[in-house]
Image: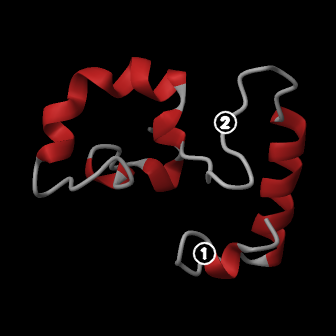
Amino acid sequence: MGGLGTHFGKNVTLEELARQQAVEYLVNQAGRSRYRFGSRTNSPRLSSTLWFRRTHGELKSDFANQNVGSTANCRACHTQVEHSLV
């Protein structure tokens, strides 16, 4: 959470209250399992997780759609994401 000014080349800095809430959530939800992903040399990508592949794998043609572009464009399909209604 300390590097949000350059998160994958974007500035996604949060206001302090939102940052604190996000940190609290992440700490409380942090997994202690063998299913972690990413490493020091390989950035973690949600799209590389087993969960993502299971829930979005059948949508490969949608990701090829010019309006969607890639798996990083969540809002193309999850239009209520700002309300946590994905």
Q: Residue at x 21, y 56 (%)?
A: 69
Q: Residue at x 62, y 54 (%)?
A: 43
**Local SS, label 2:** loop
Report crowding for label 1: few under 14, some 14 to 19, many 20 or more residues within 10 A (C-alpha).
Answer: few
**Local SS, label 1:** loop
Where residue 18 appears, x then y in whole percent? Answer: 76, 66
Amino acid at the residue labelled 1: Val
Residue 73 shown left or right of residue 3 in the figure:
left
Above or below, 8 relative to 83? below
Above or below, 12 relative to 44? below
**Residue carrying label 2:** 37
Question: Toward the viewer: 80 or 69?
Answer: 69
Where residue 6 appears, x then y in whole percent? Answer: 63, 79
Question: Toward the viewer: 74 or 21?
Answer: 74
Q: Which image quarter holds the N terminus?
A: bottom right
Is disc 1 in contact with disc 2, using a CB cutoff of under 8 Å? no
**Residue carrying label 1:** 12
Q: Give the mark nearest the N terminus, 1 or 2.
A: 1
Amino acid at the residue labelled 2: Phe
Residue 61: image quadrant is: top left
Q: CA gap, disc 1 to disc 2?
A: 21 Å
Where residue 48 appears, x then y in whole percent? Answer: 49, 35
Question: Toward the viewer: 81 or 46?
Answer: 46
In this rendering, which labeled residue sits more in front, label 1 or label 2?
A: 2
Residue 59 shown left or right of residue 24 in the figure:
left
- How many numbered markers are drawn? 2
Above or below, 8 relative to 64? below
Report crowding for label 2: few under 14, some 14 to 19, many 20 or more residues within 10 A (C-alpha).
Answer: few
Q: Residue at x 88, y 25 (%)?
A: 32
Where residue 33 appears, x then y in whole percent? Answer: 82, 20
